[in-house]
Image (cartoon, rainbow, N blue to C red):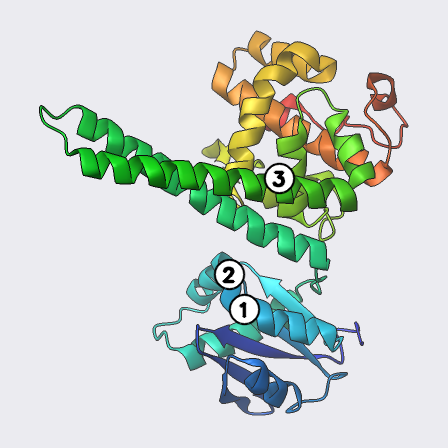
Amino acid sequence: MLSNYKVMKFIGIDISKSSFVVAYPELTGFKTAEFVNDVKGIKKFISSFSHTEYHCVMEATGNYSTLLLYMLCKEQIATSLINPKQTKHFARMMMATIKTDRVDAKLIAMYGEKMKPEIYKMPTEDIIVLKQKRVVLRQLKKQLTALKNLKESFDALPTTDRKSLSVLSKTTTFLKKQIALVEADLCSIVKESYQAQMKSLTSIPGIGITIASALIITTGGFSQLENAKQVSRYIGLCPTYQQSGTSIKIRGAINRNGDSEIRSLLYIASWSAIRYNEPCKEFYERLKAKGKPSKLALIAVANKLLRQAFAVYKSGDVYCNEHLGQGSRYSDRSLSPKAF
């Protein structure tokens, strides 16, 4: 597979549920074609271009893009998966006034040519399965919460229908059992396939089995990320900053990209970290001494926890305060309170 961008041409792919539109670069512009989004259609697309001369670029569109992405990676075709926000802002920069599938495919191809996105690394089979289980688990918990809220609203009525309450009770019991089964299955796979990594992550004060599992699943074992700053940006805990001339200097909120659930878990973990994790405790107290609000300081601690997790995961070591000094293999000296 070629990785020399100077000789690679970029194919833009706009994906929908049942089909995907492809924009092939030509000397005078682009040629577009449409394929069915199934195994047969993807095979037809793969056979339509030279694998060593083209680099495919597509947006992350959930499950609709997964099969195509998987088959392209399996054929060792250079492929990039980009955030839809990137192409949205790129379209604004290009002052696009028309939005169709074919126009979007062309814009994605142009984005690839201009920005040279990184080649996507397909996660392991275990990660693919674990992500599905996590999605199912999240939906089951949402349904359980909705049913509990419904039951509480019925309890406030002067007269309640016993049959309705019976149905709610049975369904709630069923959901609880299914949640327990999925959670047990998920934990079993994580402990079996990522035993050493789980040991490293859970050695950090403030990070337990739930957060460690979520981090491994969400990041694909940090396989797509090379440094702590990328991890922070990927999860959505990276602080934003705007500066222009002498009049605009804004330290904004976190970027909030990625999975909101893992951010919530890390924020909750920060409560424990400021008590039992010495670097996090010192960091929190330092920010408070500077007059920072408690919530902002806790978000900063959550970011620090995330960076510690990335450091110990990559090193393969268990957490130890003494290892966080200058020159260590996983120093967190880059965590400056100035960013917050």
- Quadrant showing the C terminus: top right
Q: Earlier in the sequence, mark 3 or mark 1?
A: 1
How far apart in space, not on screen, are marks 3 and 1 (Cα)? 29 Å
Secondary structure of the residue carrying tag 2 is loop
- Depicted 171 relative to depicted 50: above or below: above
Name the front one of labels 3 and 1: 3
Neighbor class of circle 1 (other Cα within 10 Å; few <14, some 14-19, many 20+) is many
Quadrant assignment, res 92 = bottom left
Q: Is residue 190 above or below residue 36?
A: above
Which residue is painted at 20% across and 38% down in the image? 163
- The residue sitting at 40% across, 68% down in the picture is 95
The reply to whether callout 1 and callout 2 are in contact (CB within 8 Å) is yes
> How far across and how far down the image is residue 326, in percent?
87, 23
Per the image, the residue denoted by label 1 is 65
Image height of 310 relative to 278, above or below = below
Which residue is tagged 2?
A: 62
Q: Which residue type carries mark 3? A: Ala
